[in-house]
Amino acid sequence: MLEKLPPSARQRCARFKRDAPKINYASSRLLLTHILNGDTSILDKIEKGESGKPFIHGFPDFSITHTEGFAAAGCVNKGEIGIDAERIRDIELEDFEDYLTEMELTHILAEGEGEAGLRFLRLWTAKEAAMKAAGTGLREPLSDACVYPGYVRYLDTDYKLTHLDIDGYIITLCTTEDAAVDFRILGSIL
């Protein structure tokens, strides 16, 4: 993967001490170049806006995420996008209660479809994806992003939600406009 990246991205990868972050960084950037135009030289054109959100002049809004062995990238031709992923795992909810609204906590603890940990991860990734779409990242309190059925309200904007459960991961996209999801495995594009 490193050979496919431009020198600047290879240098960035070299700064990581462990292999996992190197792989996550390289794979998320390769996915991004694939969905934008296939030319890895565009990675050298990434800039950051006032809020820190990455962008490339003349290209659609995009977002990338990676976590413990999984990377994803998304872009939209219209509006804004944020994407987040988490590995499905057991969660200690009391560690996160300060980041949730009363309504969100009630939803997570409700009986019924799915387990509480899975509902929490969907909600958590929705909050992070909305904050990425807005460009604030995690600098603002996560409790400022309120998750409702089908959307997240954050900074007076409603972000449409799309959840995917893929191979043990929850992937959530938040977009300001309706968006179609096209899923591809990285191995098929290398």
Image: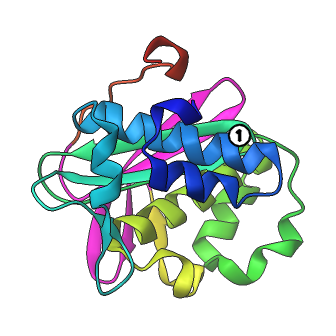
Please report the residue visible at 71 percent of the width from the left and 40 percent of the height from the top: 112
**Secondary structure at numbered mark 1:** loop
**Stretch in magenta:** 149-178
Q: Position of residue 50 (x, y in %)?
A: 30, 87
Q: Is residue 97 above or below residue 183?
A: below
Q: Is residue 111 above or below residue 132?
A: above
Q: Position of residue 163 (x, y in %)?
A: 48, 40
Please report the residue visible at 48 percent of the width from the left and 73 percent of the height from the top: 146
The reply to whether residue 53 is visible in this rendering is yes
Position of the N terminus by quadrant:
top right
Q: Which residue is mark 1?
A: 112
Please report the residue visible at 58 percent of the width from the left and 58 percent of the height from the top: 12
Q: Position of residue 63 (x, y in %)?
A: 38, 54
Report the front residue among 60 and 136: 60
User: Quick check: 51 left or right of 77?
Assistant: right
Q: How many other residues sit within 10 Å of disc 1, few (<14), some (14-19) or many (≥20)?
A: few
Magenta-colored stretch includes residue 164 = yes
Residue type (three-letter) at the residue carrying disc 1 = Gly
Report the front residue among 64 and 114: 64
Q: Position of residue 16 (x, y in %)?
A: 73, 58
